[in-house]
């Protein structure tokens, strides 16, 4: 039995840390601070954090085949050239919804960038409902809309055989699955595979491991949970020293470490003083399970 160790690697009190992605080439963890409007990169060799400030809430970051990164920024997909700190717009969506912003996003095994939107929050989990949609940015830089009526578009990943797409609309308190067609990028046959229990609170970001099990960060639940999508059962709970755990990914050597982002926004002084690492980024070792490398955007 391995023993689990949890360490805070970046304790910078991010407002909403999100979208952790391992960048193997840079030995670094990429992530964003959504309302802090920055894309960050923690170097695992030097322990240093670099950040690029942007002009709007930035909700996800992805690797790009041609090098550099792609981000979801406000209601735009945009390109980010890290060295030049240069952001260029790719395409604008939800133009009829000025109060919307993108939220979580991830690249599929064929290099398509999936990301969904939501209305701007009044406070955590309080917002105008049904305003979001789920989109895909294709390699030719065109966009496809899959569905609307989303509350808080959040965690997403694909099964190891690429035949299932997993998705979380946070306020449904459910982890859902769709049939996935990798050839076309189309989804269908939505069903719920897990309903969160009360103390697990709100499902947020998610990732898959090499055994095909899902890891879901529980916002206000202070934990990540491991789910078996075949049986619909929770098989493990790992608690963290902060309540607002937002997302998770695997990284490090052989993708054997798990990284978890967290938020501090919406916590009062008292709450923050009890959880001084709120908004930090955590590394979990000793889980005894590995993840898979992130897919780069093909465009
Ligand atoms: O991290 C995210 O995905 C959202 O941007 C957050 O705002 C939380 O999910 C939300 O507040 C909890 O429901
Ligand atoms: Zn999220």
Image (cartoon, helix red, strand yellow):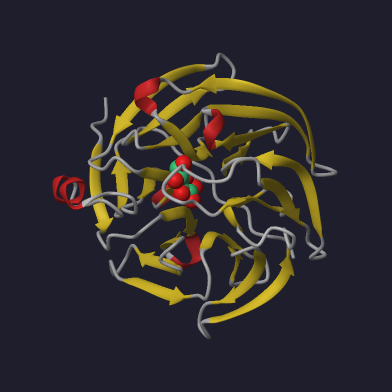
Give residue 51's quadrant in the image: bottom left
| Image location (x, y in percent) of residue 143 | 79, 58
In this picture, residue 70 sits left or right of residue 281? right
Instruction: Please indicate, yes or no, whether residue 248 appears anywhere in the rendered image.
Output: no
| Image location (x, y in percent) of residue 238 | 31, 31
Residue placed furthest toward the bottom: 84
Residue placed furthest toward the right: 184
At 70% from the left and 36% from the top, the residue drawn is: 162
| Image location (x, y in percent) of residue 186 | 81, 40
Instruction: Please indicate, yes or no, whether residue 278 appears anywhere in the rendered image.
Output: yes
- Return the residue nearer the eye: 157 or 33: 33
In this picture, residue 107 sits left or right of residue 278? right
Give residue 202's quadrant in the image: top left
- Image quadrant occupied by the N terminus: top left
Give residue 244's quadrant in the image: top left
In this picture, residue 292 sits left or right of residue 110? left
| Image location (x, y in percent) of residue 67 | 62, 72
In this picture, residue 76 sits left or right of residue 282? right
Instruction: In the rendered view, tell whether residue 199 sits above or below residue 223.
Output: above
Instruction: In the rendered view, tell whether residue 209 sits above or below residue 255.
Output: above
């Amino acid at each position: 039995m391995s023993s689990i160790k949890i360490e805070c690697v970046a304790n910078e009190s991010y407002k909403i840390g999100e979208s952790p992605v391992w960048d193997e080439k840079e030995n670094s963890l990429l992530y964003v601070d959504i309302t802090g409007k920055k894309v960050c990169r923690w170097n695992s060799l030097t322990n240093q954090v670099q950040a690029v400030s942007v002009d709007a809430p930035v909700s996800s970051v992805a690797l790009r085949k041609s090098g550099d990164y792609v981000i979801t920024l406000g209601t735009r997909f945009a390109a980010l050239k890290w060295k030049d700190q240069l952001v260029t717009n790719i395409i604008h969506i939800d133009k009829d919804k000025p109060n919307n912003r993108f939220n979580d996003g991830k690249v599929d095994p064929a290099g398509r960038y999936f990301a969904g939107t939501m209305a701007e929050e009044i406070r955590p989990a309080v917002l105008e409902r049904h305003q979001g949609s789920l989109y895909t940015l294709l390699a030719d830089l065109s966009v496809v809309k899959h569905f609307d009526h989303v509350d808080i578009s959040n965690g997403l990943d694909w099964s190891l055989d690429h035949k299932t797409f997993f998705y979380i609309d946070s306020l449904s308190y459910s982890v859902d699955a769709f049939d996935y067609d990798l050839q076309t990028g189309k989804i269908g046959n939505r069903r719920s595979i897990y309903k969160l229990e009360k103390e697990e609170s709100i499902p947020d970001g998610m990732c898959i491991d090499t055994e095909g099990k899902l890891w879901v960060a529980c916002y206000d639940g202070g934990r990540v949970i491991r789910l078996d999508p075949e049986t619909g059962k929770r098989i493990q709970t790992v608690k963290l020293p902060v309540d607002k755990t937002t997302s998770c990914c695997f990284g490090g050597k052989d993708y054997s470490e798990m990284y978890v982002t967290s938020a501090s926004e919406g916590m009062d002084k008292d709450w923050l003083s009890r959880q001084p690492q709120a908004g930090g980024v955590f590394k979990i070792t000793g889980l005894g399970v590995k993840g898979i490398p992130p897919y780069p955007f093909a465009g």
